[in-house]
Amino acid sequence: MSDNRQNSTAAGAGPEAARVRHTPAAPTRAQRLAAGQRIDAHRHDEHQIVHAGSGVVAVTTAAGTWFAPGTRAIWIPAGTVHAHRAHGRLDLHLVGLPAETNPLGLDTPAVLAVGPLLRELIVAYTRDPAETSPERGRLLAVLCDQLRASPQQPLRLPTPSDPRLTAVCALVHADPADTRTLAALGAATGTAERTLSRLFRREFGMTFPQWRTQSRLFHALRMLADGRSVTAVAHRCGWSSASAFIEVFRRAFGYTPGTHNRREPTGHHSLLTVE
């Protein structure tokens, strides 16, 4: 069965919500998804690199959601059940790697920085997946070298397991502009601030302010990909001003939100369009 099958699962639903498909080989290809389209939950016996040439890609596993614009790529280890979702028109580039080829030495998903060279290597490698020339083998070797040198980026929304944490996270996700403190959110859900603070550190490895920034950036990427203005996104996601939002976004992604939808799509070859 093809990796291209679509469904209408709601945003944020984990892969467990759909029937999991097993596709032994992780495909290498370039394809186009319309805004909101998904690739259902599945797993491979091989590793995979996921990169958005344009738009934003979100990869959801049982552990959380990893998200990446064009300056990032997502590493998915062999055996990981995952689903993809497109935000904005997505030019998706997938690179499959044999299970014995793990240039990152990671057995959990991660988001990696993608510089200009790695970006072009990914585009070139996904241009003609059927090619088997020696040059293609050398291209893959350089690509793996670049992956090893790519720093990891903390662009992840982990899935809470404690119901007290789940309740607070749901409130923040429902309204990214909510400025209530952790104490106020705790009062609204019946849990003490100290308990919630401990849960954020224990389950997510970050403080509540750090997690809320991640959540707001995720919502901001989705809204920008849908064509919202920078000022509207800043307001809807809870920043005090557009300039404050621009600075946080630039530090996180390496470019300003105003240029998000004007960035050049990767490559000029035809992409497989998912209908």
Image (cartoon, grey):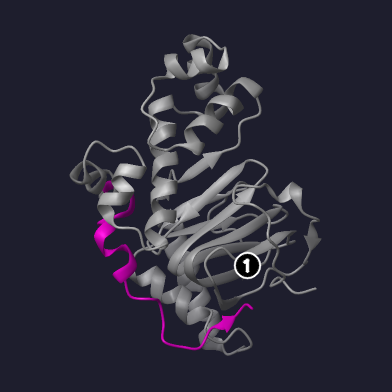
- Is 272 on the left or on the right of 246, as rendered? right
Name, please, the residue furthest toward the left: 243
What x and y, as percent, mark residue 156? 50, 44
Q: Percent position (x, y) of residue 179?
A: 36, 27
Residue 158 image point, x, y percent:
56, 38
Residue drawn where x is 40% and y is 41% of the image: 216
Is 8 or 16 nearer to us in this picture? Answer: 8
Q: Amino acid at mark 1?
A: Leu
Task: Note whether 52 is above or below 163 in the view shown.
Answer: below
Tell me the crowding category of disc 1: few under 14, some 14 to 19, or many 20 or more residues within 10 angstroms, Cα based. Answer: many
| Nearer the observer, 184 or 198 | 184
Q: Which residues are magenta?
A: 251-275
* Residue 255 seen in the figure: no
Q: Which residue is mark 1?
A: 97
Residue 274, placed above or below residue 170? below
Where the C terminus falls, by quadrant?
Answer: bottom right
Question: Which of 110/64 is in front?
Answer: 64
In the image, is residue 169 above or below residue 19?
above
Magenta segment includes 257: yes
